[in-house]
Image: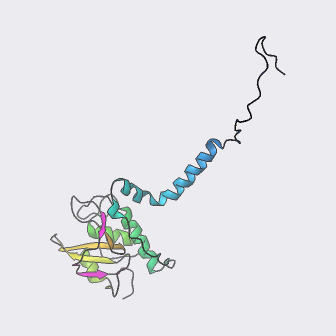
Amino acid sequence: MRQLPPGWGSPLPPPPYVHRRGPALGGVAVLVVVTVLAALAAPHARTLRGLVAGGLADLPAIGRPARPPAAGGEGARAALAVAFALRQRGKPYRWGAEGPGAFDCSGLTWAAWRTAGVSIPRSAAGQLAGLPRVRGRLQPGDLLIYPSRGPTRRHVALVVGRGRMVEAPARGVPIRSTSIRRGYLGAVRPGAGR
């Protein structure tokens, strides 16, 4: 036992009311919690950034969960095309561009379906003329062709969900997700049988 200097007396025992803590978890536990939260949030990072920037209108509509598409089937390819198109939001519009830094309207839809392994015509007019028409309800991945004042007189957008589409609208307006507008000339479904 350690000797105390003269005049100091003996140390007092801790008072009975002092709460004794268990072992502290420390920095490792905090690191594990932060890592798990980051992993859970990572797939939603673009949406979260949009919310922080005030983009509440870009939130997808919440409905009943859809049945997952069959592997390698029409639905799986459409899901790949939609995911590609949504990742391009915020990139600039540039006439004739096919990515990766900028797109025009048909360049975006062409690149999205190309990523999904489906070859489609490059122009909006070619997509309207050369792809199977939609019969019934619109589905994610369908293309909507609108009249336009541009050089080709056509504009195309890709359906991404219930009532929503993604488009490269015009010079000075970045690629965006927006509500489906009425007045389209036709809807076509890449990858569908004729």
Rendered view: 80 above or below 128: above
Residue 55 x, y percent position in the rendering: 33, 59
Counting from the top left corner in percent of width and height, residue 136 is at 34, 87
Q: Is residue 145 left or right of residue 12?
A: left
Q: Nearer the viewer, residue 4 or 53?
A: 4
Q: Is residue 17 left or right of residue 125?
A: right
Q: Which residues are magenta?
A: 175-194
Q: Is residue 95 magenta?
A: no
Q: Main secondary structure of the magenta part?
A: loop
The magenta stretch spans residue 183: yes
- Residue at 33% in and 85% down: 134
Dividing the picture into quadrants, the one containing residue 147 is: bottom left
114 up-or-down from 129: above or below:
above
The part of the image, by quadrant, that contains residue 62 is: bottom left
Front one among 185 and 7: 7
The quadrant of the picture occupied by the C terminus is: bottom left
Q: Quadrant of residue 120?
A: bottom left
